[in-house]
Amino acid sequence: MPDLRATVGERRASGKAARKRTPRSALASWAEEDRGHDALDTILAQNKIRVPELVPIRHYRMAASPWNYYRGAAAVMAADLAAQPNSGLTVQLCGDAHVLNFGLWATPERNLSFDLRDFDETLPGPFDWDVKRFAASLVVAGRDSGLEPARAAAAVTAGVQAYCRRMHGYTSMPELGLWYDGTHVDSLIDYFEPADRGRVSVHIEKKRERRTSQGAFAKLTNMAGGRPRITVEPPVRVTMSDAEQAELVGQFLAEYRLTLQEDRRTLFDRFTETDMVRQVVGVGSVGMRVYLVLMEGRSGTDPLFLQVKQAGPSVYEAHAAPSRHDTHGARVISGKRLIQSATDIFVGWGSMSGRDYYVRQFRDMKIIPTTALIAPRLAEFATACGETLARAHARTGDAAAIAGYIGKGSKFTAAISRFAGKYADQNERDHARLVRAIDAGAIQSQPG
């Protein structure tokens, strides 16, 4: 018989013991002079693996606002977090848990579920790194939307308290109950005030109908030579060379296919590649190679869009243990499956031309919030996000140990809230420096 595992009480005690190494009050600390890196150099260093002609577009998008800068500067914050005290309690990090990286998408059963949605930076690390990234994003997003500081601060408090409350609840939940736990769209709507629920429901239903492969087909394709083609819209969507297309179809998709479960591989084999383009997406991802692939089912009336996205090293790999996976595509998909309560049936990975990629369905009922939409209801949305982040961490870490470290009082929430305000100020200084460098002509910037 194996040795008996630690009891919940013993695990909780181990979390309390971690406070001796890093008091919760230490999580509030931030001092720019303690940085071990130059923020602008860190941003520019990421351009080495990107498409050179797209790099100026990345700079342009990041310079648009402090919020856009924050979204693109995960590498800067990773280096900053690594220089600060942390709990030492490890989970599978989302790695970029800012407030707009929570959203809705369709589960394999075609239900809408609310969860984290971006895993390019996923890697094991201290749970408080994700919490700090999330909390600071609420302040930055609140300022971007013109919210009063007190309302943004209230959203941080609501989000972190929700995280703590849910983490304590997970200490007594059975393992299978935790694994099957999720947030259905109806539960998400319940977070909002009754007067807002109708408006939120209408918005979700409109997006749900449009953000599908059928919706993308109607919006993004036209007929050419009797076949559907993805419309080109430089620089957002551009044609690929024959060599690129041949490698993507002849090598990559064959390798990717083998990473699918057998039943899903059978389904994938019923689709045929029809067209593909290179795509520009997001803010921080601009410059990474991204391809949009249109496939047609056997009936000829059921399109499937797959997005093939380049995966580089996680921004945390320089500051934490390296990934245990052979490729960064496998790292991203493994983290996604660990963290999400349900995952897209077509996720997989592969490599080509010495670069790693991962694959997911394009759109597939994905509903991504905007700051304008959530700002009037930021505290309610932050509550949903905080509980969702707690579930992700409880699935991949030790809920009892984390709950023991957090405690039942307000010290943890207060420390994270103080850090969030300080770091939002730092983010504004870093953004202003990027803008000055662009204005001085030291860094190229181009609309796109």
Image: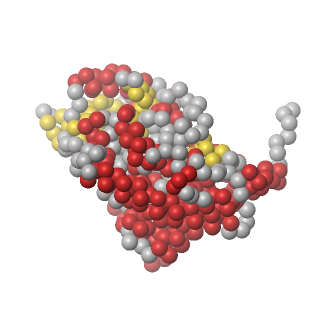
Q: Is residue 160 left or right of residue 172?
A: left
Q: Quadrant of residue 125?
A: top right
Q: Report x, y in % for residue 111.
A: 47, 53
The answer to whether residue 221 is visible is no
**Residue drawn at point x = 25 percent, y = 37 percent:** 53
For this orientation, the residue located farthest to the left is 225
**Eyeballing the image, is 252 above or below 198?**
above
The image quarter containing residue 255 is top left
Of residues 39 and 259, the one nearer the viewer is 39
Residue 75 visible in this rendered orientation of the protein: yes
x and y percentages locating residue 285 in the rendered image: 37, 43
All told, the count of numbered labels is: 0
Q: Residue furthest bottom?
A: 195
Indicate whether 103 appears above or below 217. below
Question: Which quadrant holds residue 270?
Answer: top left
Q: Looking at this view, is 264 or 199 the one in front?
A: 199
Please state which of residues 440 and 392 is positioned toward the viewer in this rendering.
Answer: 440
Q: Position of residue 180 (x, y in %)?
A: 62, 50
Q: Quadrant of the N terminus?
A: top right
The residue lying at 31 percent from left, 29 percent from top is: 272
Q: What residue sits 72% from the left and 68% below the top?
A: 409
Residue at image point 48% right, 70% down: 152
Give the vertical position of 264 relative to 71 (above or below): above
Q: Please state if 14 lies on the left or on the right of 422 as rendered.
A: right
What colour scheme has been applied to the protein in the rendered image?
secondary structure
Taking the view exactly as shown, the residue that stands out farthest to the front is 33
Q: Position of residue 305 (x, y in %)?
A: 33, 40
